Image (cartoon, grey):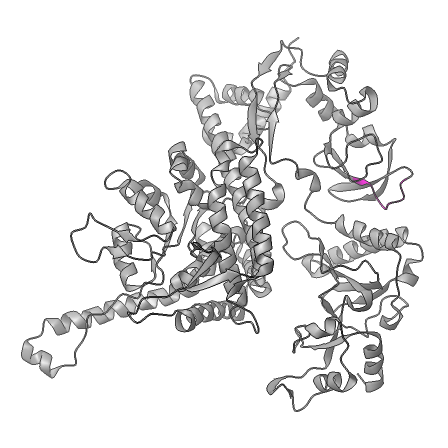
Amino acid sequence: MDKNKLKKFLENFSLITVSENKVPNFAWKPQQSTRLDWDTFYKNYSYAGGIIKKDGLEIPATNNFGIVTGFEHLECIDVDLKVFSTAKEQLSFWNEYLSYLSDNILDFNDKIVIYKTRNAGYHLLYKSKRVEGNLKLAKLKGHTEAVIETRGIGGYIFTYPDNKVLTKSYHEIDYISDQDRDVIMTFSRMYNYEQPYKEIAEVVKIKKEYIEGNISPWDDFNNKHDIWDIVSTDFSIVGNHKDKIIIKRHGSTSPHSGYIFKNDNIMFLFSTGTIYDHQKPINPFTAYVYQKFNKDFSAAAKQIYADGYGSRIVKKEQEPKEKIIINANDLAFPLDIFPKSIQAYILECNETLDSSVDYMSCALLWLISISIGNSMQVEVKKGWVETASLWLAIVGKAGIGKTPSISNIIFPLEKINNREIANYIKDYEKYEYFKNLSKKDQEESIEAPKPTKKQFIANDITIEALVDLHQENDNAVGVFKDELAGWFKDMNKYKAGADLETWLSSWSGKSINLNRLTRAGSFVARPMIPVLGGIQPSIFNSFYTDDNKDNGFMDRMLLSFPELSIEKYNDKEMDYNTIEWYSDTIISFFDTIKNKLIKRDDEGKITPLIIKFNQESKIEWSRIFNDITDIQNSDTENEYMKSMLPKQKSYIPRFALLINTFNGIGQFDYNLNEISKDSILKAEKLSKYFIAMAKKVKIDSIEVSDIRKAIKASEGKTNKEKFKMLYDANKNLNKKEVSEQLGVSLQMIYKYLKEIENEPVKI
């Protein structure tokens, strides 16, 4: 671009120079509040033999430049369409999104500046005194990258001067009203997959209620009515999506009042100007009660029963029970805790090899834990220090791909580990050969000293074998087992509780002293033994006992149990360069810690680098700690699940240490000695994921146990009769689990269901 055009950009914006991959090639924080002068900017922008010098350093020059957002109230809506797999989907989404905005913002084309980006996306630019920091507004199901986000204070955008979409250009960006900005934010957020109505209380108490035989009147009413048919007199439709309808209250000045979720037959309102509760799920019966009976549910139930809703069988009382409700949003692994390049690798493995994002991400946490080992510890406060150790159980049925998913992540370390094993075997053979030589032959030969084991990944999980290995590898010894069932079963292999107590101590970083061994070398002062392995749900459920909860063993386990299915073969291929890049990245991370960060005292023992919270992260940690404490003291939280929360208070600082180190090593000007605010917030998200997964496993355990007990109690009945009994007790039972427990196909279960539903109702 010529100088005059550049000068015009510099007059209107705060500019920075960026490389082809859109990364700034010099420190640009000052430009968030101050423009560069022309000479400095042009020096950075211009080529000087491909290299320019700044502060004594040589850095790449570039012909690209970016605009700093937030400066003089500039805000950008970044629509990233590459999350869609086809051009047709991209065009459909963009046209729909644009139509919503243009239909609800007067003179939209004259107010908003739009440029097309290089990678199937768009920038919508305007100025607003309400500009905020960078916000993720919407992401689609199965994606961690946002489809719509903002670039505001602390952000920047790449420029595309030749890709103008509407009539107005970069130099004509102007202020919009607060109402227009609200419209943009509202319609952007409505594409977010995270359904807000699921964010209700974690645990609800189900009151005593009377169930009318096979189906209650209100359930029957909900099954026979569409929520829109009930509320259509109060709202109009402003948008219709595949999974939801966007509705607007009659007379409302806001762009929309809430959603109707089609699959769930639920209305969820943000607006307070209606007879219905906002921020709560409203089903057809609830809407009917609000409209006709002024929130009197009892009177409404009697009326619809009189109108013929519900089965005509004698009432039976349902005992009150506690139900565990999970925030569905927390069940998605927070992939954004990792660097974007690593996220891209994991997603590519998912797309080309059908590997689980959850399993791979957990394997990466284990890998980071081993790499850090005893080299670092995190000081929560004086007197409270946590290690980097994690115990991770990958829960999934046989054939679901647990091991391949893990291998896609840990293969670089396995390669190093296998090389160390091979070298040890070769050196030990030389040592044995030399030792067996005569004294004379030894004097004439090159001495072969006894080698030490440098193996740091083991699949032998006996504590004796690990202690042996750990004494020669004092930073860490990681345990990886395809199946963890043996670890659970052998926990008390010797005298009662012996191995269990040793493992519990090792998790806390307390010394191991195997007094039962008579040989020397049974002591490890600072154990670091991260554990990773797979286990089938049916086997895991047998260990998910009250005893294992009481002793704290299960609460130390971090569980991953995503909903997965076996995929058909796909022809997509990953580039070898991507695999090589990932391998090099992981090996570099491992070697950096091993060669540069491990410090030893005069006796050769590792002296951990103590990492502390910075001031911002201390504030966030205090809030997180108190939030967990409030749940522990709550009367509404499930008592069984509360026992995991103290361990999460230990795990969150550990997560922060892992995230801070992995994201920081190799980055310029990153302070590895302090836990950043970003790291502790990401650690909080990770903790919520593992808490949600523990609840999911518990629900599955209870459900499977109830199904097994019911089937066992109905011996002598046909499979159809057994299923009918289960279905009558719980209309929402897990049909796939029932098919497995009965030993019949899922198709047969649906055949039973169809036959049962077509049976005449007894009156």
| Residue 482 at x, y percent in the picture | 38, 50
Check the image and report above or below for 261 versus 210.
Answer: below
Q: Is residue 299 left or right of residue 368?
A: right
Can residue 344 be found in the magenta stretch?
Answer: no
Q: Decide whether the magenta segment is chiefly helix, strand or loop.
A: loop
The residue located at (82%, 54%) in the rendering is: 184
| Residue 701 at x, y percent in the picture | 47, 33
Q: Is residue 398 visible?
A: no
Is residue 516 or residue 438 the one in the foreground? 516
| Residue 201 at x, y percent in the picture | 63, 35
Q: Is residue 541 visible?
A: yes
Q: Quadrant of the C terminus?
A: top right
Q: Quadrant of the N terminus?
A: bottom right
Check the image and report above or below for 249 versus 521.
Answer: above
Is residue 713 or residue 42 the one in the foreground? 42
Check the image and report above or below for 161 versus 471.
Answer: below
Number of numbered tags placed on the structure image: 0
Can residue 253 be found in the magenta stretch?
Answer: yes
The residue located at (23%, 42%) in the rendering is: 494
Query: Residue lying furthest bottom in this view?
Result: 49
Is residue 11 or residue 265 the one in the foreground? 11
Magenta part of the chain = 252-258
| Residue 750 at x, y percent in the picture | 58, 29
Q: Hey, which quadrant is residue 572 in on the image? A: bottom right
Q: Hey, which quadrant is residue 308 in on the image? A: top right
